[in-house]
Image (tube, rainbow, N blue to C red):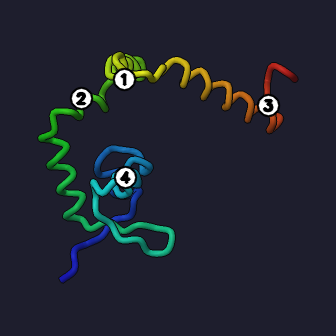
Amino acid sequence: MLPRTLSVKEAASCLKVQPRTIRVWIAHGRMHASKIGKSYIIPEPEVEKMITATKTSTDNHFTTMTKQERLDSIRGCLANSDINLDAILSLRRKEANSRKFKAGRCNSCQ
């Protein structure tokens, strides 16, 4: 007998994460799923395995952190690296503002 399957949205709801997180886990091989057309179906035992792994994981503390705490944690990891997180974030904000302006949604110009 085949196990019951869940959609990405249902699995995300069970695991209390965003559907995008489920898709990332699938892409990185952390969760097994079958692709039907453009959608994934996830076997229920796979979701149960993730629930167990999440409960026993010591690193799920990262998911309960605030945005600023996560950024500080990443900065700490990058302290000995050539990567400048503030420069990356500044560039991403500029790109986002540029897209808003091009789309005609710039509030400051109206």
Mark 1 or 4 closer to N-term? 4
Taking the image as drawn, is residue 66 in sight? no
Report the Cα–Cα distance between label 1 and label 4: 22 Å
In the image, residue 50 sits, relative to residue 63, either above or below, namely below
Question: Which amino acid type is marked by label 1?
Answer: Ile
Q: Dots 3 and 1: beta carbons under 8 Å?
A: no
On-image quarter of the C terminus: top right
Relative to 79, is 46 on the left or the right? left
Image position, residue 106 (x, y; %): 79, 27
Q: Dots 2 and 4: beta carbons under 8 Å?
A: no
Image position, residue 79 (x, y; %): 35, 16
Query: What is the residue that sits farthest to the left in this orientation?
Result: 56
Q: Which residue is mark 1?
A: 74
- Find numbered disc 1 in the image and state the secondary structure of the residue it sits on: helix
Q: Which residue is mark 4?
A: 22
Question: Which amino acid type is marked by label 4?
Answer: Ile
Residue pictured at 67% horizontal, 31% vertical: 96
Residue pictured at 34% horizontal, 18% vertical: 80
Mark 2 or 1 closer to N-term? 2
In the image, residue 64 sits, relative to residue 49, either above or below, namely above
Disc 2 crowd rating (10 Å Cα; few below 14, some 14-19, many 20+) is few
- Find numbered disc 4 in the image and state the secondary structure of the residue it sits on: helix
Q: Which residue is mark 2?
A: 61
Question: Which amino acid type is marked by label 2?
Answer: His
In the image, residue 29 sits, relative to residue 110, either above or below, namely below
Report the Cα–Cα distance between label 3 and label 1: 30 Å
Residue 66, by quadrant, is: top left
Report the Cα–Cα distance between label 2 and label 1: 14 Å
Q: Which residue is mark 3?
A: 101
Question: Which amino acid type is marked by label 3?
Answer: Phe
Relative to 87, is 18 on the left or the right? left
- Find numbered disc 3 in the image and state the secondary structure of the residue it sits on: helix
